Amino acid sequence: MDLVDFILEPLNLVTFFPLLGVLLLLFLKHEQKNASRWVALLTSLATFGISLWVLDLFDANDPDLQLVINKDWITVAGWNIKYALGVDGLSILLVLLTTFITPIAILSTWSAVEERVRDFMLFFLLLEIGMVGVFLAQDLFLFYVFWEFTLVPMYFLIGIWGGGRRMYAAVKFFLYTMAGSILMLLAILWLGINQESFYMPELLETGGIPPGTQYWLFLAFAAAFAIKVPMWPLHSWLPDAHVEAPTAGSVILAGVLLKMGTYGFLRFNLPLFPDAAVELARPMATLAVIGILYGAAVSYSQKDVKKLVAYSSVSHLGFVILGLFALNSIGIQGAILQMVNHGLSTGALFIIVGMIYERRHTRELDEFGGLWKVMPVYAVLTLIVSLSSMGLPGLNGFVGEFAILLGAWGAGAAGGSLGSYFFTGLAALGVILAAVYILFMFQKMFLGPVTNKANEELKDLNKREILVLVPLLVLIFWIGLYPKPFFNLMGPTVDQLVEVLNTAITAALP
Amino acid sequence: MLLSETTTSGFFNLVPWIIFFPVIGLLINLLIGKRLGERGIGTIASLASASAFVVSVLLAVSINGHHEAVVVQFADWINIGDLQIPWAFRVDTLSVTMMLVVSGVGTLIHIYAAGYMHYDVRYKGDPKSYRRFFIYLNLFIAAMMILISGDNYLMLFVGWEGVGLCSFLLIGFWFTKNTDGTEGTENALAAKKAFVVNRVGDFGFLMAMFLTFWAFGSLQFDAVFAQVDQVQEDVIIAITLFMLLGVAGKSAQIPLYVWLPDAMAGPTPVSALIHAATMVTAGVYLITRSFPLFSAAPEAQQIVALVGGATALFSATIAAAQFDIKKVLAYSTVSQLGFMVAAVGMGAYVAGMFHLVTHAFFKALLFLGSGSVILAVERGHHPLDNGHEDDQHGEEHHEPFDPQDMRNMGGLREKIPLTFWTYLMGVLALSGIPIWAGFFSKDEILTDALHENPTVYWLLVSAAFLTAFYMGRQVWLIFFGKARTHAAEKAVESPSSMTIPLIILAGLSVLGGLLNFPGVHTFTTWLEGTLGHDFAHATEFNFTVAGLSTFLAFTALFISWLLYGRNPIEVDQKDPLRRILGPVFSWMNNKWYVDELYAMIVIRPYQRLARFLAETVDWRFWHDWIHDSVIANGFRSLTRFLADPVDLGVIDGIANGLADFVQGSAARLRVIQTGYVRNYALSVLLGVVVILGYLITR
Amino acid sequence: MVPVSYYVALSAILFSIGTLGVLIRRNAIVIFMSVELMLNSANLLFVAFSRLYDLEGQIFVFFVMTVAAAEVAVGLAMIVAVFRNKRSIDIDQISSMKG
């Protein structure tokens, strides 16, 4: 009975439910393509349903971890490793985002993947387990296991179903991420040995890591997370991975995997090493601002649509980092919301690119033009998503960006300093540049006359494709017009975190 | 009077409907518009806008005499700690004024467009776009209403960017065309330019909001204004200057005015509604709305006034040398916006708003009139148009023909009399001829300018002089003389759905001055409800100022008659102004090469920088060199070194030696490996026996 | 009561028969049966001695029987597989492991 209870714990269910789909898939033959698709879709939808149940159980007013599962896992030789899952305001939205994006990504790839469908879906569901696990794990060791676990399915997704240089991209993706993770592993082990625990609540309670040590631990964790985000200048793997990955892979990569990096900063770097975070906030913000401007400028002169969107991620996630290292409530809440927003709008953009790629088998901007005339529904949906991506008020991107910039402006002890004004001003320039590259893309693809004969007969979106985008659009409008429920979910936890940070900020003052 | 309250009396709770009605209209058209047909679509859209107008009137009735703003909370929006921003609507005399203008002029333009677009979509060869047009138009009304009814800066900003989006969509409405109607990307590029330039302004607005929030702890109007005297003046100056940048973007002031003339790529009703009457005045509204901030920062006010004055004069010079009928009006709009910005910059908020209202009347009239002229010429140009005009697209473009070029017109007075007379009303109003609306509002600005800032006064007076001149030039070129093309000869008067709005607007352009007639000051009293007595002072009528500007207006009209009216220009004749001004005319005609300047100092360097970053820094250096050469190849060389000499030589040597040894012994031992299980079992048995024997005998 | 030594003797006899069977017979199934015989001779000892001491011996018997059953399942599967390939279950034919 205990075992059944354990399995039925909400967080265990939401993490490992896709495993059921994996098992079912193993019983299918390679030829049963549609059956594989349906199994994967239904499993991921059920997982989404479970995550909604978790949301229902979640008490938004409680800042602490909830629905905690805490079992001893590896206790040999004095190691105190626990199997610990828990959810709080920092992670609930990201869990929901993951379970929400996964079925959409599966649906979006319905007709794009024809080779080895079963295996594709299998890796996809495995990936979902890893991602949800990353957001729920409350034990550093367990976190590390899930963190590395996500690499494997993604490696295969890129390496098997990718484009021309898929092996190059897959290996590069794998190695870059591994390189960062190693440093993180060292830091985790240091903590486990010196603090005698890997369990987050215990680590936070113990505290008392001297600032000098915090500094190095912070950097070690940051190495893993900064590569994952990716922060400038560690972004070199991103365009390759995105360009080569299949559509659904790109959607998940942009929608969720990159968030694991920013989430890592939020979950571990800020609360565990507050003094180092205060000390390093300025350099981190500098990198973030460079990333914002650099990503925007580089996007602008891409010729491949997918690459353009990929670089735009560098810019967008720069905003998230900037918000996190504002170290105040407005900035951090904005950053969390922006993680969700980026997942939605960039995910949608990749789906959109995938749709045109399926029709034309090219992504060169110069090949397009005047598509609005040929595919009006597609054009309108793209327009809305693009506008959300460039932060038009009334859509989701704006709420996040505004909160981030507002928070960054007031970063520091007394409502901002000249430095923070300067940073924010530069970052706000990114808002202009975002309009430049996104409108450039939109104009190149959709406006003007149809110049290319190959585009004249393109079919507009079918029902399935519209169905893929509609849920994303609903959320895009919802968050833009009424983000209150989202902020309510994260508010108390963030406030608690900010208290810790404020103590550190006060301590750092001369 | 700065206190706000939430009240349920009156019609105030209806205020969200000024947004809902247009949204409902656009949703109906979006979902079932295809089945409604053109007439249905136009009716729905116009009704949506008219309903908003009715609500605005009800609000106006309710707020009249109310000396407090009424705030209607609708829903929460953003709530993070101190950052509490609701969806809240503010009803006071200022916002109601804007609502009336937007929905009133908007409705007239909707009705006009229902007729105009019927022809336009056919000439552009895409009748399906009819529905799209009205969806955008209703969307615009909704966004504009958010802008003017918001109770905090952020909501204002929502509308601010929302109207920018609609402007983008509508400028790029014919996105497959060039401005002259051929296939190309010019319209799309104009739309993009408008959006991007506006974004530059929005950047300023954003910065202003950040500063405001951290200085005042709120973005709600009343909360901010109540604390003005507790905040350092430097901060307020910074806020207002950043706001000025936003204003320059939206209201097309120097240095960001460049998008507005290009925006004429949109269909003419759009130019009338968005790029003349309503959206571009949002900047003026913003300054008036923030009057406590601006009034607390005299230095910033000086700059605002100077920017406005300079813009007014600068763009007037450009307008004087344009040939495109809409370009003239566009630069004229920039110039008139300069008047308004200068006025509100000097603290003459009432005068600025007054001019905003009258300008909305006569500039909408002029644009709609120009649309009527263009359509008339276009219908004259198209042979298909005779008789069976419905359902036929104009496919027979024999030669490139620009129906907007005033050199292709002439003598239209007799062909389209109704358009001519209404247009004339607009011209007289804009030129500032006494009795017409523009005279009073412009005069009020000039009088205030004389008191507040003589430099600005002279800038504005010169601009007013040029205004009368270029409007006179336009009238002579379009309506007088002989028809210079076949198309102009065959021009046809527009249908009544277009002319009726023209007549109504013409009436308003004549009588609009009564709103704030000197000595009565109805409008001043009205706005006092928002601005308070100190800032809504009635300007006394100044006969010197009025006399001088009247004299200048008549002189300018006379000069334009000398140049263009006395001897109407012939086909292919050079512009008479060119004879007088020489190369300066070319400069004016080419807009002082400002676009080229921006391309040189901003756009191309950015493009080059972006390409450099993307191709050289990011790809060749970072991606290819650092990653592929340094890291990957470095690692590969290392592995090759380890593999060849180290691994093969040393480690393999040891390993191979071991292997040889093992192989040798194995060859000898393999004999006992028979492959029969029985033999193995026997040896197991023997082994057991031996071990047991040892254990027993031990 | 039968003395324990009888059981031991019987068990030793059975075990020897089993051993000889494994070593001598060539039919794989018979060899299997012989192996079973050896296992059961051990079981007999377990049971006999558990009467003298405690019940652990009997528990072991169960384990042995389980293992034997598993072994038979696997073994028979292998024999079937071998038969499919070689058309024979004569173990002298199967000497591909010869060194």
Image: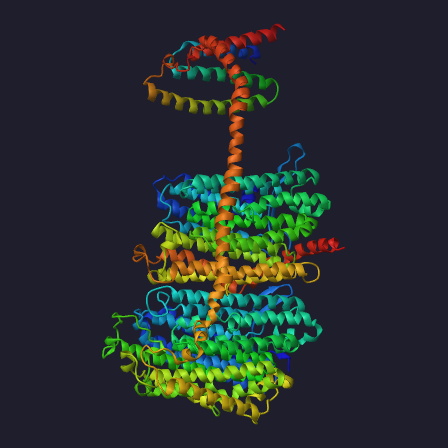
Which of the two residues, C17 or B260, is positioned nearer the viewer here?
A: B260
Query: Which picture quadrant has residue B384?
Result: bottom left
Q: What scheme was used to colour the molecule?
A: rainbow
* Residue B683 visible in rendering: yes
* Residue that appears at 64% across and 61% down: A421
* Residue that appears at 56% across and 83% down: B458
Query: Which picture quadrant has residue B378?
Result: bottom left
Q: Is residue A318 left or right of residue B375?
A: right
* Residue B356 visible in rendering: no
Q: Name the spot of residue B357 as percent of width and height, x first.
A: 50, 83
Q: Name the spot of residue B457 as percent of width and height, x first.
A: 57, 83
Q: Name the spot of residue B472 as percent of width and height, x first.
A: 42, 85
Q: Is residue B396 left or right of residue B407?
A: left
Q: Name the spot of residue B354 as percent of width and height, x first.
A: 53, 85
Q: Is residue A281 above or below residue B27?
A: above
Q: How many dots with numbers?
A: 0
Q: Is residue B332 left or right of residue B111?
A: right
Which of the two residues, A127 or B264, is positioned nearer the viewer here?
A: B264
Which image quadrant: the C terminus of chain B? top right
Residue extending farthest to the right is A510
Which of the two residues, B614 or B122, is positioned nearer the viewer here?
A: B614
Which image quadrant: the N terminus of chain B? bottom right
Residue extending farthest to the top is B697
Which of the two residues, B191 or A97, is positioned nearer the viewer here?
A: B191
